[in-house]
Image (cartoon, grey):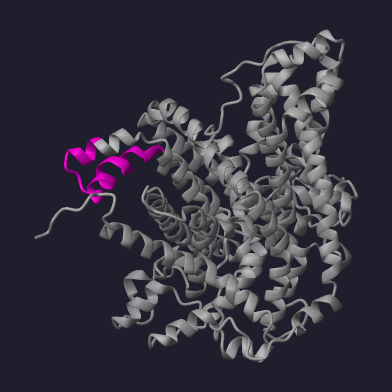
Amino acid sequence: MAVSNDAATSIRRTQIALGRGDDPLRPRRRGPGLSGRDPILAWLFVLPMIVIAMLFLVVPIFMAAWVSVSDWTGKGSPLSGSVNFVGFENYAAFFSPGLAQRDLTTSIRNTLYFVLFVVPLQTLLALGLALVLNSRRLRAKSFFRTAYYFPSVTSSVAIAVVFLFMFSASGPVNAILAGIGLEGPNWFADPRGIFHVAAAAFGVEGTPSWAAIDLGGISLWQWLAGPSVAMCSIIALVVWVSAGGYMLIFLASLQGIDEEINEAATIDGASTWQRIRYVTIPMLRPTTTLVVTLGLIGTWQVFDQVYIMSQGNPGKTTLTPAYLSYTTSFGSFQWGQGTAISFMLFALIVVLTIIQRTLSRDRGDRVVAPRRVRRAERSTR
Amino acid sequence: MSARRPASRRVRPTTIFFYVVLVLVAAVYIYPFIIQIGTSFKSDGESTSDPLNPFPASPTIGAYETLSKVDFPLWFLNSTIVTVCVTIGRVVLCSAAGYALSRLQFHGRRFLLAAILAVMAVPGVVLLIPKFLILNQLGMYNTFSAMIIPLLWDATGIFIMKQYFDTIPPSVEKAARIDGAGVFRRFWFVMLPMAGPALITLTVFAFQGSWNEFTHMIVARSSADTNTLTTGVAALTTGQFGSGNRYPLKLAAALVMTIPVAVVYFIFQRKLVRGQGAGAVKG
């Protein structure tokens, strides 16, 4: 599997993984069941893919699981006799005071703010754009759609380079800010949390005594810092890139809403805004849940942008669990701890997925699906 | 007084408001690329002294000349090799697997489908270190096979093909079977030529995915001569090639690596855009 953060492919992959794509276990049309008398021949067709998946996906995960409970330092093979089993020592390092714990806690704090800002912003932007683009009176819709989706198909590296320039100290963003009389910060060198900046504006400087208590290696005051100025530029980038993909998901869903429903609402005297607020948005709820889940899963894995733009700096305020796991392994050769972080991140993402699936099932979101599906399929033909 | 004009003629305030929103957002989406193009033709000094102006005062192709002298052409070549191999490989392997899962009856078929779904659910970032471990173990690290073979796995592609084969009526194949065609012949000469639209989708996704692939390339290799465009430009950006901002150079590199994908996007955008949306509604 390509470990790509690219929106288009990863969204599709996740949709199918979440059972939101066609459910291949229950095909609408059953395979015709002709031929296939020769099972060996059939296996030959799938064998190459099975071998690749086993060798480069399944086996490696078990190897990594072993490394996470071993004392391997990167020399030789982790399977050699000189590598010892150390139990959960590598995991325990994150639950006792020390540098490992402080780094992991910091990365979780950073990513928590990253998620809290990115997911609502990208969902709202995507929904807003989709609602506007779905309006029947507008022309040149495909032009706008193309423009908004374009960043999603381009390389994360290329986009990161453009944003590094946009947010550089004497770059375009600061030039615009200067144009309206504001002095822009030196974005990627500024570790101040924006909530701390706001607090300072109200005269709160330094750590207040009530916020000095330690929570997992950093003080409560540090927890409350908010995303750093540097992180804000990464937040802007990710919202800008991913909104287009989610907009398309909303648009496909909007096309499935019966026009008669809107007409009925209009006849009943609903204004455009009331129609959107009380008819369209409630009907989009399953899609909104999907977009939020995909957003949560994607944002907790943020890696490329950090690697290219900030390497966790300044002051570790853009450190994320995915990047920390990478540098712990490849940078400081603590492979046990590095893999331990990635398994904990894995567990977190699984939990998020399960919570979301349970929530959407309880609300009976799937009940409305079949009708929408048929209409959407017709309209996309 | 305010005679009510026909609804179709009236330019409603909401419509104007919608256009204003769309145009403003489009500016935010397009302007960075315009600045990128303009700045790539500027000198280092002008890039930061007049960052908002996309028109260079004294245009120079210095950035592109520098690019042609560093390893950039090699990165481009490596990216091309990887992309061509991955795309061809995925098209062949995904359609074979998709055909078997759609048409052939064999023990373990349902288990296989469930297993593919389970593997797909593993978040990509978790696989970073594991992939390095196995490539290192097998002695493949820093080779093209390490960069290519793991990328051949494409569960989404398998499902795209399987679902398309599901829609082809069984009668088509039945006729060929009566004529005595074996499984391979039916797959290659009957079914595959009929799967054109799915094959195009698969090819476009495979091209775009492997050209942009970054994380796999940083764990599968580290030598300078195996850099692809993504890892090469990332190294350029993180300062591994000397100091200074050198924005025109970096932006030119990013621009050149964007062009192939942009061309494919504008040709096949309906495919990409529909593929993105359609999968989602089928909840």
Residue A45, magenta (yes or no): no
**Which image quadrant: the C terminus of chain A?**
top right
Residue A91 is at least partly visible in this image = yes
Give coordinates of residue B205: x percent, y percent: 68, 46
Q: What residue do we see at 67% from left, 85% from top?
A: B42
- Left/right placement of residue B146 relative to residue B234 reads right
Q: Is residue A311 above or below residue A336?
A: below
Magenta residues: mostly which secondary structure? helix
> Which segment is the magenta one?
A264-286
Give the camera-side residue of A226 and B11. B11
Q: What residue do we see at 29% from left, 46% from top?
A: A276
Give coordinates of residue A299: x percent, y percent: 53, 54
Give the camera-side residue of B183 and B267. B267
Give coordinates of residue A213: x percent, y percent: 39, 67
Give the camera-side residue of A92 and A148. A148
Give the camera-side residue of B8 and A336. B8
Quadrant of res B122 = top right
Quadrant of res B105 = top right
- Left/right placement of residue A240 relative to residue B138 reads left
Give coordinates of residue A120: x percent, y percent: 40, 55
- Left/right placement of residue B172 relative to residue B227 reads left
